[in-house]
Image: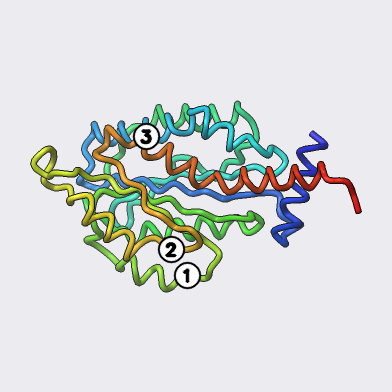
Amino acid sequence: MIRAWIMAAVLMACAGTATANCRQALVLALDVSGSVDAREYHLQMGGVAAALDSAEVRNRLMAMPAAPVRLAIFEWSGAADQAIIVPWTEIDSEVTLDGVIAKLRSTERREATPATALGVAVKEGHRLLNQQPDCLKKTLDISGDGKSNLGPRPRDIRMQIDDGNITVNALVIGVDDPQMGDIRQAEIAELSSYFRADVIMGPDAFVQTAIGFPDYARAMKEKLIRELEGLVFSELKAEALIASPLR
């Protein structure tokens, strides 16, 4: 425990934020608009649960218990249809993480308008991240299978919130060939380009793709590993500093 606190202190000092006690605030925003049917809803919820339950993601989340990740999850569709599934939770133990996973697996779909208010969802994610001012890193992950069709444009919201303090990544769900699945889903290359141009922002922002909802668990796992890799690398640097003799 003492070693973990020392590593956390070194990491925070290197980041210039010695008063912080949270290494990352992470918001997952899940698309439950009208284009997502009941089967796909459960594939999405189960996919997030499976990703969090994977050994690779667990290890990264548990890497620095003295400076844990804080996680919040909400679902979105229309302009007034954001709903918190998991409120801000400090992932400081396996038991806490298991509770989040169980909540996701037991969540049932609620009634919501079928619209896709992507700009509003980004704004809501930004609002939630602002509730965690002491976290070294702030990340919004937004999943979607279509373009915004209601409310402010995501690119306009991005201009309003781009203060350099947050990263917005995207998980785009689509199909390679619309003839192989629902024609309501945009062809994945086009949809990825849209999210890349209009939605993502911040340091090292990226778009992850899932070939349909059955591929969602794999895509979410890879995205979480990529987002948490930098934190693990920072931990290794801190450990190297601790092991070095004082000069």
At 73% from the left and 47% from the top, the residue drawn is: 238
Amino acid beneath label 3: Arg
Between the C-alphas of marks 1 and 3, the distance is 29 Å
In this rendering, would 156 be left or right of 180? right
Residue 44 horizontal/vertical position (percent)? 33, 36
Q: Nearer the viewer, residue 202 or 176?
A: 176
Q: Are marks 1 and 2 in contact (CB under 8 Å)?
A: yes
Between the C-alphas of marks 1 and 2, the distance is 8 Å
Instruction: Indicate the secondary structure of the residue bearing disc 2.
Output: loop
Which residue in the protein does label 1 denote? 162
N-terminal-most mark, 3 or 2: 2
In this rendering, would 163 be left or right of 212? right
Q: Are marks 1 and 3 in contact (CB under 8 Å)?
A: no
N-terminal-most mark, 1 or 3: 1
Instruction: Indicate the secondary structure of the residue bearing disc 3.
Output: helix
Quadrant of image for the C terminus: bottom right
Which residue in the protein does label 3 denote? 218
Amino acid beneath label 2: Met
N-terminal-most mark, 1 or 2: 1
Res 201 label: 2
Which residue of the protein is positioned furthest toward the right in this rendering?
247
Q: Nearer the viewer, residue 114 or 158?
A: 158
Circle nearer the viewer, 1 or 3: 3
Amino acid beneath label 1: Asp
- Mark 1, residues whose alpha carbon is within 10 Å: few (<14), some, or many (≥20)? some
- Mark 3, residues whose alpha carbon is within 10 Å: few (<14), some, or many (≥20)? some
